[in-house]
Image (cartoon, rainbow, N blue to C red):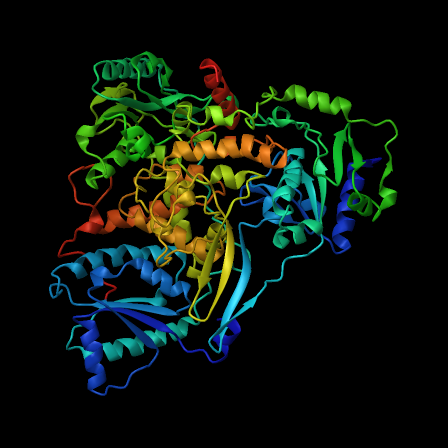
Amino acid sequence: MTNEVKERNWEPKIVAFVCNWCTYVGADAAGTSRMQYAPNVRIIRFPCTGRIDPLFIIRAFQHGVDGVIVSGCHPGDCHYVSGNLLARRRWIVFRKFMDFLGLDLRRLHFAWVSATEGAKWAQLVNEIVEEVRQAGPAPTWAMPTDGATKIEAPLPEIGLPPSPPPELTLQIRELARQLLGTGEVGVVVGYEKATGAREGAATPTFVNKPEDADRLIFNEHCVHNLAVYLTNPLVKKFGKVGIVAKGCDIRSIVGLIQENQIKREDVSIIGVVCNGVVVNGRLADKCVACPVKVPHIYDHLVGDPSSVQATTSGHPLDAQIAYLESLSPEERWNYWMPQFARCIRCYACRAVCPLCYCQPCIAEKHRPQWIPTSPHPQGNLAWNIVRAWHLAGRCVGCGECTRVCPVGIRLDLLNRKLAIEVERAFDYRPGFDPSAPTPLSTHRPDDKADFIR
Amino acid sequence: MLRKRLTSENLNKWVDSLIASGLRVVAPVREGGLTLFRPITSSTQIAADYTKTDLPFKEWLFPPTEVILHYRIVDGEPVLEDPEVDATKTVALFLRPCDAAAIPILDSVFGGDYEDEFYTTRRRNLTVVGLSCTEPQPECFCTAVGLSPTSEMGSDILLTPVGDEFLVEVLTEKGEQLVNQQPDLFADAGNLTKEQVTEQAIAKMMRKESLPTFADTYADLFEHPIWEEIARKCLGCGICAYSCPTCHCYDIVDEATLFEGVRCRNWDCCGFALFTLHASGHNPRPTQAHRYRQRVLHKFAYFLQTYGQNMCVGCGRCVIKCPVGMDIYEVVRKIVQACERVGV
């Protein structure tokens, strides 16, 4: 629908995703009691709020609704015991995420409405319709016509990290020789010197014979997160995998173990003490406040823990996130939409992420096509939201997605924002405890969600 | 071929006059940290110190997404509508010889036996002003694939910086028309030549050695185990295909609601696992090794067989943008070496 048609006789169009057992019956009760309330809401019935994927909320906005209500049973009353408690966790994080992207929160509402609360439902709808009316027609998911917002909070000047001493390279080679020679592992995934046009850089390599171990190196250019290869069939065919891993890479490995994608005993972790890697000619942002310069989980440790430089500052992205949060939702929207409009859907962000292992990816599913494959602004917005959302509470901040994006989208800001919210709400940081449940697959009775009516 | 000379000042005047005459002028522009071909409204917007754009020129002839069909359901019957194809008269400025050479390659595909009007409409209305290279980058290897830093292929006009002015080679009628918009800005070339500039540029190139092609030999190296060794680190993203000036594979999708919809053509990449996935679930290219082999052979064998030209222009974008540093120049040499070792 065009904006002109919308504005002439515009009435808010609102979709409500409700659970079958409580809110749906409550809404029905409002009807049978002949309560009068605003007719702007179309209800979609689900078995449980736990079934409501934020993807549905995204799709609703994509298809032009002006507001969304999500409502279900009160905590403790879920027909399936804990579906709504899992949903609550999702809503806590998703709502903050939408706010960060620039969605006007007057358009997104969450509620507990029981089967007997017909009056509450009617009042809720009336209130929400008015709020959405105040917010106006939802912006179409297209490029803003005025100039893009810029972040007026530059990243701090960071120099270069120190070069790791050559002993690390020699130790790694010796370990590889041993592990391959004894047959403990079938392949060692590590780094070798890049040749040709990328001279000076490092590149991933796979050593499956002890005599080839001298190819392996370790230096400040070893940026790649090699954990991505642990789910690669061309690597797994060798059997147990030895992997040269920095602390950030090990956090990804922990994620893969938590999610049962690999078994701890199928990998031999060669943990490397790391003072940081170089991305775009400077120390990578992720390294500035790195908590795992000395690897926290490993089978073999390479390097001297006393050589690490103490972390003296917070995460460099936090100031940029704070800047974006200080702006109005429209200004934030005007920042993100031009970013996503540049996306060419190369999926390098997905390909390089160790935790994007789903086959098929949600973007590849087509009955129905949840995420439009076309690289137009609407399709790109849907993809980028879902990518970041699916990594909420799982992304360890290795920064690879941002490094590889050919059009420079600030995926690191999205990932970091979600990580901050998950830590704030659930006191959880991914990649430390392989036996911990993942934050969105569990719940606590005291999860705080003041925004739920 | 007409040969003229042009000062830098007159070049800018000429560009501004082209813009003023109502032509859409597309040039390399800095945008959000990237260098991209974008329409300009003044010669001052052209990116200074421009080496190569981040994305290739092809998006102006073959957009990343394009509607090829509209439909509506009217009284229960589908009504089909062709979209209007962009026929704006366009001048593309400062394509490097590698990027310009990509255009005749795409012409073979889209303007061949079956004319693709979405492409040919744009192509017909496009005039290309190429800009020779004086500073090849480490990833460049145009000479290895039969081109050069001052190659004329694909340009209607080729500008070559010689000293502090430009040699202007007017190669086609379209180019002549463009020069004739402001003939007084151009002087006769006299004895200005680009030979020295060409020699110097080639001397700076790091990777000059000619790359073999596989049009006649690929059957023998098809099953060689080297493919798996090379492709193991490939992550199967689409950066190489999307940053390549000649890659042209696409996917067709329908986006529709109950009563209306569009059929879109979108860029696709042979590196994606989905690329050859059949509805049955069978995939004739089941591993990244199969898919990477396809990429290399399409570039260096199949296209040559079908169209008589090498499909790679040696721009090196795939090399610098690959997340894991796959280098097609090194890959091709490695394959040949491996095959030679076993007498293939």
Depicted B70 relative to depicted B92: above or below: below
Depicted B252 relative to depicted B313: above or below: below
| Side of A359 relative to B332 (left or right) | left
- The number of numbered discs placed on residues in the rendered structure image is 0
Of the pair A60 and A281, the residue shown nearer to us: A60
Q: Position of residue A266 (x, y in %)?
A: 20, 29
Which residue ends up furthest to the bottom in the rendered image? Answer: A34
Q: Position of residue A281 (x, y in %)?
A: 47, 29
Of the pair A390 and B171, the residue shown nearer to us: B171
| Side of A234 relative to A199 (left or right) | left
Of the pair A268 and B30, the residue shown nearer to us: A268
Query: In the rendered image, which quarter contains the C terminus of chain A?
Result: bottom left
Residue name at image x 35 percent, y 64 percent: A105
Which of the 4 quarters of the picture holds residue B300?
A: top right
Residue A326 in sight here: no
Residue B96 in sight here: yes
| Side of B181 relative to B273 (left or right) | right
Depicted B206 relative to depicted A132: above or below: above
Q: Position of residue B335 (x, y in %)?
A: 48, 22
Q: Position of residue B72 (x, y in %)?
A: 50, 70
Residue name at image x 51 percent, y 67 percent: B71
| Side of A195 relative to A57 (left or right) | right
